[in-house]
Image: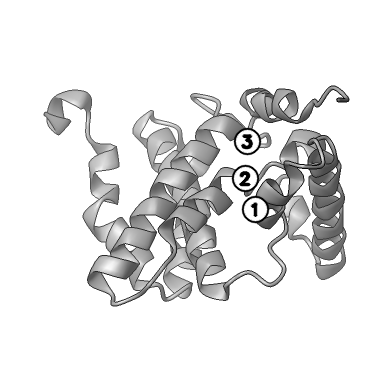
């Protein structure tokens, strides 16, 4: 069997840092963001099923969150102002992400690929799951902004407002509930949490 480098690449998520154009009080790795997004996605799925009468496949949602940014292992984190500057750049970057994900999948032994492909290729995915995934991703970014503001870093204030607005525009009761019920505690110190 040929040596596989897939997991070695996945482990490099801890070396990819987000928010590269911003002054950070504490750098956030892609690994940290991914775990936060997966935990938040789990919560959003549970809220959908328990409070809003949905039938979300929570385990699938969490797995989608675990692998949602893996392409950045090969591409790096493209700053938002560039990634969304115009439709052509946005579309071109999506194509680059697809190529990067395919390259990662090709590193797996053939017999394991079918286990991973559904988490890297979102075509044909349940649009409701993708909305919850997007909301979890945005909430993770919002939490980073809150943490930076709590550290006295005003660099993230505009990003915080922009992200709050984009979450509100999603019209997802699960995301609104997370923000009202859980987000305020992110501003507390460890002594205040006790």
Q: Which secondary structure lies at badge 2?
A: loop
**Residue sitting at x 38%, y 61%:** 45
**Image quarter in which the C terminus is found:** top left
Crowding at dot 3, Cα within 10 Å, few <14 / some 14-19 / many 20+, comes out as many
Which of marks 2 and 1 precedes in the sequence? 2
Q: Which secondary structure lies at badge 1?
A: helix
- Residue identifier under label 2: 67
Residue 17 location in percent, x, y?
Answer: 64, 30
Q: Are marks 1 and 2 in contact (CB under 8 Å)?
A: yes
Q: Nearer the viewer, mark 3 or mark 1?
A: 1
Identify the disc placed on residue 66: none
- Residue identifier under label 3: 18
- Residue identifier under label 1: 119
Which of marks 1 and 3 precedes in the sequence? 3
Image vertical order of residue 29 relative to residue 117, above or below: above
Which of marks 3 and 2 precedes in the sequence? 3
Q: CA distance from mark 1 to mark 2?
A: 6 Å
Q: Which secondary structure lies at badge 3?
A: loop
Q: CA distance from mark 2 to mark 3?
A: 16 Å
């Amino acid at each position: 069997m040929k040596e596989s480098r897939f997991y070695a690449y996945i482990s490099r998520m801890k070396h990819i840092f987000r928010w590269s154009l911003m002054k950070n009080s504490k750098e956030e790795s892609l690994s940290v963001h991914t775990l936060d997004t997966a935990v938040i996605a789990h919560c959003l799925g549970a809220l959908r099923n328990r409070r809003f009468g949905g039938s979300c496949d929570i385990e699938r949602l969490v797995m989608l969150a675990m692998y949602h940014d893996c392409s950045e292992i090969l591409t790096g984190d493209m700053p938002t102002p560039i990634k969304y500057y115009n439709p052509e750049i946005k579309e071109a970057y999506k194509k680059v992400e697809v190529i990067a994900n395919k390259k990662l999948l090709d590193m797996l032994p053939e017999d394991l690929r079918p286990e991973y492909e559904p988490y890297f290729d979102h075509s044909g995915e349940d649009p409701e799951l993708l909305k919850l995934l997007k909301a979890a991703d945005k909430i993770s970014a919002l939490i980073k902004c809150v943490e930076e503001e709590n550290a006295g870093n005003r660099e993230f204030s505009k990003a915080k407002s922009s992200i709050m607005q984009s979450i509100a525009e999603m019209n997802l009761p699960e995301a609104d509930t997370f923000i009202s019920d859980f987000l305020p505690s992110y501003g507390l110190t460890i002594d205040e949490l006790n």
